[in-house]
Image (tube, rainbow, N blue to C red):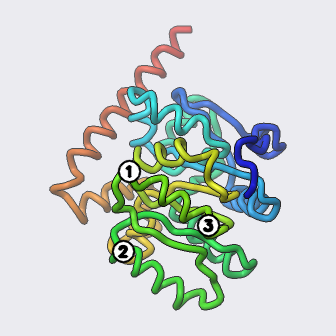
């Protein structure tokens, strides 16, 4: 087993150390998709543990009051920006983010890379039927891809150690955790030093998208930062209040910090 108790010094990696910024209290790395994939490949090739996460508007807002989530995110090795709202908001404070690097896009690109390079992913999370759909799609699109293992996300808290044991026994090269925030962040933080997987990342609802349960917004809406509107259109009763509350809090947060900065 790789010794995960001594984390690889990613903070000193030239690419990561040179691209680190802090926005509204959250560190993030101003990387492109290609640079992010390069780091993931390095981690898997050299078996150097790399804990990856992303920040979006909802997570950034929640981090203002949820100390555990803030800890879980800020202690990750690599933090990408997944949200045009953050890209635009950061520009107000002089932080230039080269591009939005969405978690679902990273996952899809990495799965294709795994198929080409022989890396073995472990899939954790989502409903059993969604996970089955993901596995079927992978089998159709990447027949040569070897799945190290899989487990749906509907297991009780007391079974977490068994799940970690199953993951470690699979000797996977990467782990995708498809659970909602903050469950995936807490899971990865709790077991970070136990997981014998070099590259781990939380992917939230990405299995739902990849497995066809949820449709993703058209590219023009993604570029315009309107994915949230598309999600509300699909599930208005469940999501409208959540996005209204989150977006309102984010605008207030930007305004408050902008005024404080202007008074200095």
**Extreme-left residue of the structure:** 237
Looking at this view, is 183 or 251 the one in front? Answer: 183
- Mark 1–mark 2 Cα distance, whole angstroms, equals 23 Å
Residue 143 is situated, as x and y percent measured from the top left of the image, at 60, 91
- Mark 3–mark 2 Cα distance, whole angstroms, equals 24 Å
Which circle marks residue 158 in the picture?
1
Residue occupying the point 26% across, 38% down: 245
Residue occupying the point 45% across, 16% down: 259
Residue occupying the point 84% across, 43% down: 14
For label 2, the residue is: 130
Which circle marks residue 169 in the picture?
3
- Mark 3–mark 1 Cα distance, whole angstroms, equals 19 Å
Taking the image as shown, residue 123 lies to the left or right of residue 199, namely left
Looking at this view, is 69 or 186 the one in front? Answer: 186
Identify the image quadrant of the N terminus: bottom right
Residue 87 seen in render: no
């Amino acid at each position: 087993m790789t010794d995960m108790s001594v984390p690889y010094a990613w903070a000193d990696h030239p690419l990561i150390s040179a691209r680190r910024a802090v926005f509204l209290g959250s560190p993030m790395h101003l990387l492109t998709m290609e640079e992010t994939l390069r780091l993931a490949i390095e981690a898997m090739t050299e078996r150097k543990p790399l804990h990856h996460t992303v920040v979006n508007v909802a997570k950034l807002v929640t981090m203002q009051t949820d100390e555990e989530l803030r800890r879980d995110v800020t202690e990750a090795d690599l933090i990408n920006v997944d949200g045009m709202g953050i890209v635009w908001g950061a520009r107000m404070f002089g932080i230039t983010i080269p591009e939005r690097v969405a978690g679902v896009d990273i996952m899809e690109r990495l799965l294709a890379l795994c198929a080409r390079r022989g890396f073995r992913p472990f899939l954790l999370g989502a409903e059993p039927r969604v996970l089955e759909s993901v596995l079927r799609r992978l089998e159709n699109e990447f027949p040569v891809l070897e799945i190290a293992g899989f487990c749906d996300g509907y297991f009780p808290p007391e079974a977490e150690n068994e799940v970690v044991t199953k993951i470690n026994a699979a000797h996977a090269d990467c782990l995708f955790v498809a659970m909602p925030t903050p469950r995936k962040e807490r899971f990865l933080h709790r077991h970070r030093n136990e997981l014998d997987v070099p590259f781990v990342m939380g992917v939230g609802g990405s299995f739902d998208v990849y497995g066809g349960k949820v449709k993703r917004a058209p590219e023009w809406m993604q570029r315009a930062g309107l994915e949230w509107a598309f999600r509300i259109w699909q599930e208005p009763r469940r999501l409208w209040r959540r996005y209204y509350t989150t977006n309102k809090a984010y605008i207030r947060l930007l305004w408050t910090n902008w005024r404080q900065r202007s008074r200095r």
